[in-house]
Amino acid sequence: MRYRPLGNTGLNVSEIGFGCGNVGGLMIRGDHGDQVRAVARAMELGINYFDTASSYGNGQSETNLGRVLKELSANVYVGTKFRVTTHQVGQIKSNVIGSVEDSLTRLQREQVDLIQMHNHLASEAEGGSISPEELLGEVVDALTQLREQGKVRFWGMTAVGETTALHRVIGSGSLNTIQSVYNLVNPSAGIAVPSGFDMPDYGNQIGMAADNGMGVLVIRVLAAGALSGEAERHPVAVPSVAPIGSGRDYNQDMSRAEGFRFLVQEGYAQSLVEASLRFALSNGGVSSVLVGYSSLEHLQQAVEYANLGPLEPGALERLPEVWAGFTG
């Protein structure tokens, strides 16, 4: 396993992280024995970052991960997430603190290494979206207090929502990390996309984050399975998945994934999964790629593919031809 700096935090994280979310589902719906074996094997393979969230299985992922890590006496980095559920001025700070403390209880930990805001970001706060002003104000105040109390070490956000709002926060230097949607279907978080591109354009947020000393954790590297090359889903995986930051629906993502079959047919990779992981790791601004697992086999495979290194230049040079077709 190779390791990369998590921005300017001083932490070095494994190139492949252990995602504990709903898509793969292992840490929510898997058997306890399978969860223990997978986490133990992940550590044997060198994975040192485990990522969960309060919303994954309504807290079940945090509970299961905490139980397994305690059982294994694991010395690893743990990150989780919170959602701000109020826009009431003066109440956001306590809302965040309460959520984080609940997460610590479920995880059976006194501290997490990374806490991340899970809300979408928007210029104007409404519904479940948070504005830059709210994030850089009461949310950061809450996280600062939690750090002073020794309950969190570093903080970041899931970088989805309006690009202008995201860039404003990334450029502020107030966060340590972002989680970035970055995959072959939509590479805009790390690469310039053609004019008329019909998916969200995240405007190279990965490069901007790197310039501001922030770590980047890649999410949705397989577009929730659309880039797996297989239509059938594992029994513990979520049965259906709405896209985040890609096409209008999962079927469109699967259709567009077929445009990358040449990477396998021409010998650049053994599978679309391999091509997808190695594509993300080809970006020097990426700290770690978070993969959601359904089985021990998925875990083993991801690490083996990552160890092959970035995609070769000949493959990367061909990709813009495919993206040029993703226009409205």
Image (spheres, helix red, strand yellow):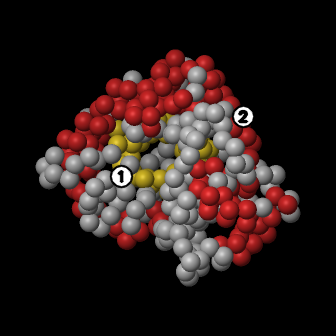
Residue 45 lies, with reference to residue 281, above or below; the image says above
In the visual, does 213 lie left or right of 307? left
Q: Quadrant of residue 182 in the image? A: bottom right
Residue 19's spot in the image, x, y percent? 54, 40
Q: Is residue 120 visible?
A: yes
Residue 312's spot in the image, x, y percent? 77, 63
- Tell which residue pokes out farthest to the left in this image: 90
- Residue highlighted by disc 1: 119
- Residue highlighted by disc 2: 297
Mark 2 to mark 1 CA distance (whole Å)? 32 Å
In the visual, does 150 lie left or right of 23? left
Q: What is the three-letter code of the residue carrying label 1?
A: Asn
The residue at the point 48 percent across, 25 percent down is 64
Q: Is residue 207 visible?
A: no
Residue 57 lies, with reference to residue 178, above or below; the image says above
Residue 62 lies, with reference to residue 321, above or below; the image says above
Classify 10 Å Cα crowding around label 1: few (below 14), some (14-19), many (20 and above).
many
Q: What is the three-letter code of the residue carrying label 2?
A: Glu
In the visual, does 128 lie left or right of 310? left
Residue 168's spot in the image, x, y percent? 34, 68
The residue at the point 66 percent across, 76 percent down is 325
Q: Are marks 2 and 1 in contact (CB under 8 Å)?
A: no
Q: How many marks?
A: 2
Q: Quadrant of residue 48 in the image? A: top right
The residue at the point 73 percent across, 52 percent down is 229
Q: Quadrant of the C terminus?
A: bottom right
The residue at the point 58 percent across, 70 percent down is 191
Residue 162's spot in the image, x, y percent? 39, 67
Secondary-structure class at tag 2: helix
Q: Quadrant of the N terminus?
A: top right
- Tell which residue pokes out farthest to the bottom in this image: 195
Please report whichever mark, 2 or 1, sits nearer to the chain's N-terminal start: 1
